[in-house]
């Protein structure tokens, strides 16, 4: 069980970090360029080119760091932690950003203003995006690492981590809302 949690957390790290990096790097031109659909913004000012690019890059670079750490850490804790091929790293990081962007699209369509909470979607949008993109970019690696039990742990563990990290970011004044 602890092995499962360790692998799930490790394998998702390149997907967890991009959204937090985007919060720090955000600003500048919105992706939707101000365009609207049905009287509401397509995505809103909270989804920017800079935040998305920096978030993706940070996730991919983190995966390279984890690749260096994996052998040593695996031996130390006695768990076989996976390394990330480049396609998988890009899938996890870019997919997390795209999932979050997709959620903003849904938020605007359902009348939610920028920053409004969308429970469950807020916590799992980037998981869905990361898993789908990783499967598309490197199916062999995806099926090898994200077994059904690992995916199960990810789906349970991620909302807990998401609420905790966003709460901390809010208390530190880095984020406007605690979700
Ligand atoms: N951010 C960004 N680009 C992204 C994602 C996030 O620039 N692709 C930055 C923005 O500054 C954003 C902040 O990170 O305001 C917080 O992200 P998030 O909570 O996802 O956006 P919200 O502003 O809450 O907007 P939304 O309601 O659309 O989620
Ligand atoms: Mg938000």
Image: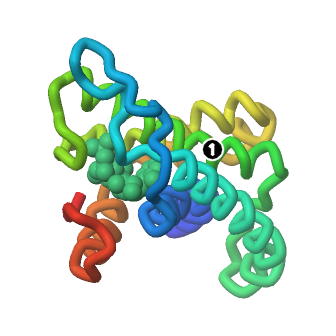
Name which residue lies at 42% across and 62% down. Answer: 23
Please state the horizontal and vertical placement of residue 2, each as a whole percent of the image.
50, 69
Please state the horizontal and vertical placement of residue 53, each as a whole percent of the image.
63, 51
Question: Does residue 87 appear left or right of residue 122 in this picture?
Answer: right
Q: Looking at the picture, does residue 48 appear above or below residue 60?
A: above
Scheme of image coloration: rainbow
Question: Does residue 166 appear left or right of residue 66 in this picture?
Answer: left
Name which residue lies at 77% across and 78% down. Answer: 69
Residue 27 sits in which quadrant? bottom left
Name which residue lies at 51% across and 65% down. Answer: 25
Please state the horizontal and vertical placement of residue 43, each as a whole percent of the image.
37, 32
Residue 159 sits in which quadrant? bottom left
Q: Looking at the picture, does residue 25 appear above or below residue 52?
A: below
Question: Does residue 22 appear left or right of residue 104 in this picture?
Answer: right
Name which residue lies at 69% across and 58% down. Answer: 57
- The residue under label 1 is 94
């Amino acid at each position: 069980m602890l092995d499962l949690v360790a692998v799930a957390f490790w394998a998702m790290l390149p997907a967890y970090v991009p959204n937090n990096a985007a919060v720090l790097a955000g600003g500048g031109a919105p992706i939707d360029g101000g365009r609207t659909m049905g009287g509401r913004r397509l995505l809103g000012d909270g989804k920017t080119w800079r935040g998305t690019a920096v978030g993706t890059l940070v996730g991919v670079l983190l995966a390279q760091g984890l690749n260096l750490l994996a052998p040593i850490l695996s031996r130390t804790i006695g768990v076989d932690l996976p390394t990330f091929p480049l396609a998988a790293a890009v899938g996890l990081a870019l997919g997390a950003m795209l999932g979050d962007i997709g959620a903003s699209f849904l938020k605007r369509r359902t009348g939610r203003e920028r920053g409004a909470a969308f429970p469950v979607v807020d916590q799992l949008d980037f998981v869905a995006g990361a898993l789908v993109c990783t499967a598309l970019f490197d199916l062999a690696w995806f099926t090898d690492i994200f077994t059904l039990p690992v995916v199960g742990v990810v789906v349970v563990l991620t909302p807990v981590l998401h609420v905790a990290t966003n709460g901390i970011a809010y208390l530190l004044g880095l984020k406007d809302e605690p979700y």
